[in-house]
């Protein structure tokens, strides 16, 4: 049975990575793989083995992640529908390439910790499009946005889905993950930024996307009242920041706090638009926002986590952990390798597998393993453009070529990744 499960998982995983080559959506492949793995387990399990109980336990943990993501995505869509992010992005006034590179990267780093790295990457690339017309300049900024968004998401429990998984699973806690990973994540973006700054000639200006006859960029005119934008941004961002506090105060799972935030912003949306007619109000309603969220991604996570759960329930992942420890030996090197692998394949199943390989009894909450894993899995995906959700999204938006990214950005991301990893290990050795 074990061999069959491993073979099914590997086949499903390969088909997921070949999504564009075979023209089959990875969500469909993940769902089929997850269900078939559990079906094989149920059909071949020894008599009396509680397969149903294992499935129920796995599904309860999976549901916590999925409901959290559902709520977070909807809140972000509502903020975006009300153009709340323009309150931040419209303040960017510099036209110096060096300065703009640092401002956009810094905003991506901070926003990805408050929202999530995928949404942040999309927002910041949209901003870059408004400011920069030159394709090469904009591509370089898009590459730095990917690195910054992934780095910013790694140190926040709500910034990257893999860190969120570790947080919900009890492997890391809010204050500790921020405290330990903020500096390594910052180093992983500062090093590439410093190199790019050195390579960019001093005084170089960007080519503005739209300008009047005097060369002054035209201001963006919002269709939403400024008061409404401010209110929705405050409730959305403030609510997301409140979720970890809610978890600490009540002990309830994070998705409960996120549902509370969704309910609050839903009420606010209904109140501020109560006098509008239905046609005018519809694009600003939570119901419409729910129709715009990336539902296939949520189902993809469901399929992947189901498949990984079957391997965990049958003990395959525990055996794999033992093999890695015997072969590689050093746990830090194993985690660094996991981060490098996440540049090639999706980091969600990798982290899910690691959570099943190493238990909380041996490695309790906030152990070095979990902290370092959150950093490596979160930032390692920047090394290749296909290694993270922000990378794939930006690749489609800016039509970035895989080989261009490999030549221009990958080596910067790799240097930043290794610099951040060494920073974490160095600080850990000194302080602990």
Image (tube, helix red, strand yellow):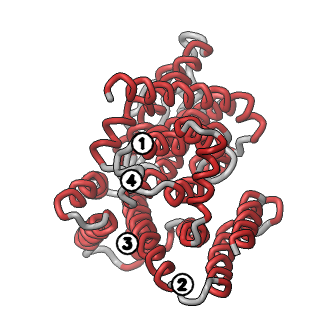
Image spot of residue 29 (x, y percent): 70, 71
Observer able to see residue 49 = yes
In the picture provided, is 404 more to the left or to the right than 174?
right
Picture layout, residue 338 above or below residue 358: above
Quadrant of residue 267 in the image? bottom left
The residue that mark 3 highlights is 286
The residue that mark 2 highlights is 49
Q: What whole-number distance in Å separates the C-alpha atoms at marks 2 and 1?
A: 34 Å
Q: How many numbered discs sit on the rendered protein?
A: 4
Q: Residues within 10 Å of mark 3 (few under 14, many from 20)?
A: many
Image spot of residue 204 (x, y percent): 57, 15
Observer able to see residue 228 = no
In the picture provided, is 362 more to the left or to the right than 15?
left
Mark 3 vs 4, N-terminal side: 4
Image spot of residue 16 (x, y percent): 72, 62
Image spot of residue 356 (x, y percent): 52, 60
* Circle 2 SS class: loop
Mark 1 vs 4, N-terminal side: 4
Q: Residues within 10 Å of mark 4 (few under 14, many from 20)?
A: many
Q: What whole-number distance in Å separates the C-alpha atoms at marks 2 and 4?
A: 27 Å
* Circle 1 SS class: helix
Mark 3 vs 1, N-terminal side: 3
Q: Residue at x 31, y 36 (%)?
A: 179
Q: Residues within 10 Å of mark 2 (few under 14, many from 20)?
A: few
Picture layout, residue 316 above or below residue 115: below
The residue that mark 1 highlights is 371
In the picture provided, is 359 more to the left or to the right than 146?
left
Q: Residue at x 35, y 46 (%)?
A: 366
The residue that mark 4 highlights is 171
């Amino acid at each position: 049975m074990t061999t069959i499960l491993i073979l099914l998982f590997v086949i499903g995983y390969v088909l997921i990575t070949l999504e564009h080559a075979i023209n089959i959506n990875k969500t469909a492949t993940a769902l089929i793989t997850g269900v078939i793995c559990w079906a094989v387990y149920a059909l071949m399990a020894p008599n009396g083995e509680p397969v149903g109980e294992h499935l129920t336990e796995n599904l309860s943990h999976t549901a916590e992640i999925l409901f959290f993501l559902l709520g977070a995505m909807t809140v972000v869509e509502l903020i975006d529908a009300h153009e709340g992010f323009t309150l931040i992005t419209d303040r960017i006034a510099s036209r110096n390439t060096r300065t703009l590179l640092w401002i956009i990267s810094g905003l991506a780093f901070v926003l990805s910790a408050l929202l999530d790295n995928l949404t942040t990457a999309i927002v910041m690339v949209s901003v870059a499009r408004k400011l920069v017309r030159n394709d090469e300049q904009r591509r370089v900024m898009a590459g730095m946005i990917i690195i910054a968004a992934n780095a910013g998401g790694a140190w926040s429990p709500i910034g990257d889905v893999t860190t969120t998984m570790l947080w919900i699973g009890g492997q890391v806690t809010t204050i500790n993950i921020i405290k330990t990973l903020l500096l390594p994540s910052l180093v992983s973006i500062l090093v590439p930024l410093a190199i790019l700054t050195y390579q960019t000639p001093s005084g170089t200006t960007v080519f503005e996307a739209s300008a009047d006859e005097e060369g002054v960029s035209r201001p963006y005119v919002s269709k939403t009242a400024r008061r409404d934008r401010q209110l929705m941004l405050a409730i959305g961002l403030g609510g997301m920041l409140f979720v970890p506090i809610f978890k600490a105060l009540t002990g309830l799972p994070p998705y409960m706090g996120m549902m509370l935030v969704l309910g609050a912003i839903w009420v606010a949306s209904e109140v501020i638009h109560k006098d509008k007619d239905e046609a005018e109000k519809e694009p600003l309603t939570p119901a419409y926002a729910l129709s715009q969220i990336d539902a296939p991604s949520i189902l993809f996570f469901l399929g992947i986590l189901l498949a990984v759960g079957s391997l965990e329930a049958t003990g395959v992942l525990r055996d794999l952990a033992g093999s890695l420890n015997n072969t590689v030996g050093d746990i830090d090197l194993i985690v660094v390798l996991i981060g490098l692998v996440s540049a090639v394949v999706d980091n969600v199943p990798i982290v899910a597998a690691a959570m099943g390989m190493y238990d909380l009894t041996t490695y309790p909450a906030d152990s070095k393993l979990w902290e370092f894993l959150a950093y490596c899995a979160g930032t390692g995906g920047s090394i290749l453009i296909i290694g993270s959700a922000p990378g794939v999204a930006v690749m489609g938006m800016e039509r970035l070529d895989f080989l261009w990214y490999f030549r221009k950005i990958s080596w910067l991301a790799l240097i930043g990744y290794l610099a951040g990893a060494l920073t974490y290990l160095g600080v850990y050795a000194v302080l602990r």
